[in-house]
Amino acid sequence: MTSPPAEIKPLTSALNNLFFKVEAARRHEREITAFAAHELRTPLAGLKTQAQVALATPDGPSRERALRHIVASVDRTSRMVRQLLALTALEAAMPATVTNQLSVGDVLREIISSTPTPDSICVVIDSAIDGLTLRGDPDDLKLVLRNLHENAVVHMQSGGQVHWDRVANSEGLVVTDEGPGVDEVDLPRISERFFRGRKNGVAGTGLGLTIATIAAARLSAKISFHNRSDRSGFVATVRWSNDTSSSAPFAGV
């Protein structure tokens, strides 16, 4: 094939790059659509079955169990739809322009209070978190905290604890749970879209940590993941620069 003239090489390069981005966007949309169609089919079928059971059974306890299954299925489906919408919005969003001064502790408590948590699970918040403030988009911070918290809660067994602590030297936040942890082989891929890992025994979407990671990047922060060393459990740490100047996204107070 004959090479294009040097004068139009920048144009052809720009067009090729544009076509690549368009194809990548189309491929991403197809993946999202296929995933949503597959994942919605099972809970919707389960909802119909449990509704039929509740309508048909004259037994009170059996009807109550069916209704509880319906509520749980609706909660899982609602979370999946919310995460799909959040991921799509994040990946299509322009760079954040809102830079409000936010109290990380206040936002975290708002997220925890609005997240359904079984009474058997205890959530502990380090009071030192109240000394952290953030300059950034409040929606991005909420996405980080909500998805990290939901990920911790959903993998917990009855009687377990979720801990939110401030990292030493004002460097960030860490959330620790007492769940099964993650297979070490899976850790490098844990924030990939739709990746659930080998130890994932719950009905999840594989999107929560992806959303948290993307939203954190918009706040100029990074999230690292590892297993607990003292017992079974998973740890997610959000870190940012130690620089507390006006250009830093986070600042210790």
Image (spheres, rainbow, N blue to C red):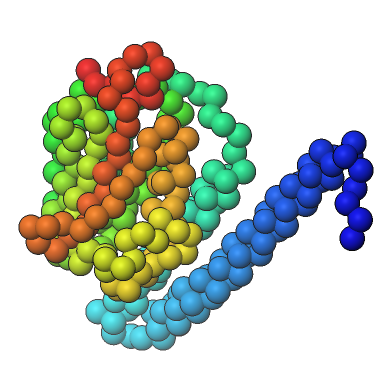
- Horizontal side, residue 90 vs residue 182: left or right: right
Q: Can residue 202 be seen by looking at this rendering?
A: no
Seen in the picture, residue 134 relative to 43 is either above or below; the reply is above
In front of the other: 24 or 166: 24
At x 14%, y 36%, the residue is 126
Seen in the picture, residue 52 relative to 124 is either above or below; the reply is below
In front of the other: 133 or 240: 240
Q: Residue furthest left?
A: 230
The percent coordinates of residue 27 (x first, y second) are 67, 61
- Horizontal side, residue 168 vs residue 203: left or right: left
The percent coordinates of residue 194 (x first, y second) are 47, 64
Q: Can residue 153 be seen by looking at this rendering?
A: yes
At x 34%, y 44%, the residue is 223
Quarter where residue 169 is shown: top left
In front of the other: 198 or 129: 198
Quarter where residue 227 is shown: bottom left
| Quadrant that contains the C terminus | top left
In front of the other: 123 or 137: 137
At x 32%, y 32%, the residue is 240
- Horizontal side, residue 78 vs residue 58: left or right: right
The percent coordinates of residue 114 (x first, y second) are 32, 44
| Quadrant that contains the N terminus | bottom right
User: How many dots with numbers?
Assistant: 0
Quarter where residue 125 is shown: top left
Seen in the picture, residue 239 relative to 253 is either above or below; the reply is below
At x 27%, y 25%, the residue is 242
